[in-house]
Structures are given as C-alpha cells and as structure tokens.
Image (tube, rainbow, N blue to C red):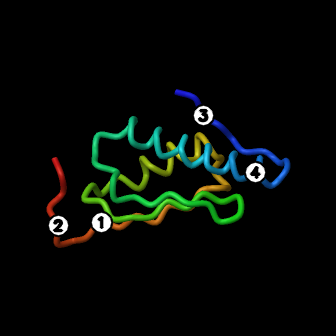
Amino acid sequence: MVLIAPDGGRPQERSADAAALLASIRCAVSSETTFDTGGLCFRLLGDVVIIEGVLRERDASDTIRRIAEEIAGAERVIVRIGCPLDLPEAK
C-alpha cells in the first residue's frame, strides 16, 4: 500500500496532496479493518483530517484513529465515531 503525506507547495499541489492523503487513509481503514466503513466521512479542515460517522462496532473508533494517525500524524487527526446503543454490535 502506498501512503502519501502532504507537504507545502502551490495551491494546486496542496489540493492534490490533500486528496491523496484522504484516499490513502480511506483505503487503509477499509483494507485493515474487518467491519463496514462505508458510513464514514473523511475530510480535511485545514491540515487536520476529520473522520466522522456511525458504526456498530464499539472499538472501531480506536482502530480507525490508530490507522489514520500512522499516516497523517497524531496531531492531525480528529475521529468522531458514534456507536448507537439501540443497534446490536456486528459480529
């Protein structure tokens, strides 16, 4: 798997780097987890990666945070994932 970290540069380059960073994180999360990640939203706010969504697995947030931090850096990742109490956990 190829992971791309963004760097400075012209606006067009930063935009391409941002898209590549999000694609890298999305791909890594999808391929390194055993649960459905289709309900997650990946976006950038400045140079911070924000991952949001609702999943059935209670430990999903920790797993997704670890993967994203390995790619983007711990100081650049915010994870907001909820696990509704009324949904049964996936097995």
Mark 3 surroundings within 10 Å by alpha-carbon count, few (fewer than 14), some (14 through 19), many (20 or more): some
Of pointers 4 and 3, the one earlier in the residue sequence = 3
Q: Give the label, 2 or 4, closer to the camera.
A: 4
Name the amino acid, label 3: Leu
Q: Do tag 2 and tag 4 residues touch (Cβ < 8 Å)? A: no
CA separation, marks 4 and 1? 33 Å
The residue singled out by tag 1 in the image is 83
Q: Marks 4 and 3: which is nearer the front? A: 4
Q: Viewed as shown, does residue 17 lie left or right of 64?
A: right
What is the distance, in whole Å, between disc 2 and disc 4 at their CAs? 40 Å
User: Tag 1, which secondary structure?
Assistant: loop
Q: Front-most of 70 and 53?
A: 53
Q: Upstream in the sequence, badge 1 or badge 3?
A: 3
Q: Amino acid at mark 2?
A: Leu
Figure disc tally: 4
Which residue matches tag 4? 14
Q: Residues within 10 Å of mark 1 (few under 14, many from 20)?
A: some
* Residue ID for mark 3: 3
Q: Which residue is mark 2?
A: 87
